[in-house]
Amino acid sequence: MHMTVPSLEVSEAFKRWLGSRGFIYQLFTDFFGRKPTLSLIAQWGRNRQIGAAAEMSEGGRELKRYLCGQKPEDLLQVCEAEAAEYDRLMRDEAVAGFKPREAALLGEAEEFCNVLSDVYASAGIVFKKCGDEADDHIAIELEFMAVQHERMLFNSFSAKSAMELLDIQEQFLREHLLLWIPEFCERLEAATNSPLYLGLSRMLKEFLPYDLHMLQSWRASLESAPAVVQHRPSVAVV
């Protein structure tokens, strides 16, 4: 897979991060956004990229061991158990004690979703939702980051547009994801013994601050080499 990025020397750490972050956001979106199915669990368990992503966090390594370590004959039973746990955690408010939504966790009014809707619209994104997910649902917010990542890597852009995409992602992490998801993860971990959701929670909690740090470092690399970004052709990061 080739990804177009602004032309500059790319360290191994940047390559690993750039090559894995979209995959990681999509993994979170899939498992927090819908009930696990047999095909979903089998698909992620066979995905080779999960190894590279797992190396970024202890939670990722836990998740890899769980998803990749299932025997084919056990997958149906695992799927049924995790699907039931998804319903309990993500849909049964009386049992789990929280909702997977930013406004609910931060005590914001329902009109808060209009803020997120404006953010998505200003970025030119309209989500095709599978159900009745609100704009502040954890899966929608994480998918927003996945979409922005794809735009950043798979389009040719100038230094100016690169910075704009970085701005959007950094701001969304600081003003939304990092304000409520760490608390969401703490509550999730207190509410479940599921290896799947414990691994996802721990991975998410570790990954978000790391992702912000890497975005900021990537920005610094771009800013330190403006002439290179503007005048040399793009390079491919594999």
Image (tube, rainbow, N blue to C red):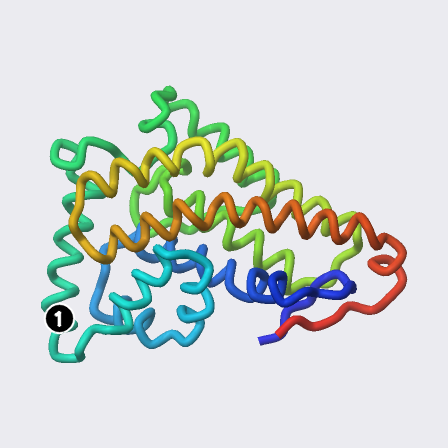
Q: Nearer the viewer, residue 3 or 137?
A: 3
Query: Where residue 100 sits in the image (x, y, percent)?
Result: 30, 38
Q: Nearer the viewer, residue 169 or 71?
A: 71
Classify 10 Å Cα crowding around label 1: few (below 14), some (14-19), many (20 and above): some
Looking at the image, which residue sits at the far front? Answer: 58
In the rendered view, does 172 fall on the left or right side of 64?
A: right
Above or below for 165 versus 17? above
Q: For the C terminus, which image quadrant? A: bottom right
Query: Who's the residue at 32% across and 66% down the image?
Result: 64
In the rendered view, does 216 fall on the left or right side of 6?
A: left
Query: Where residue 177 sits in the image (x, y, percent)?
Result: 46, 38
Query: Where residue 108 sits in the image (x, y, percent)?
Result: 38, 21
Q: In which quadrant of the rendered view does residue 4 lie?
A: bottom right
The amino acid marked with disc number 1 is: Leu
Count of number-bearing discs: 1
Above or below for 177 versus 144? above
Residue for badge 1: 76
Query: Where residue 155 sits in the image (x, y, percent)?
Result: 68, 62
Query: Who's the residue at 75% across and 53% down the image?
Result: 221
Query: Who's the residue at 60% across and 62% down the image?
Result: 13
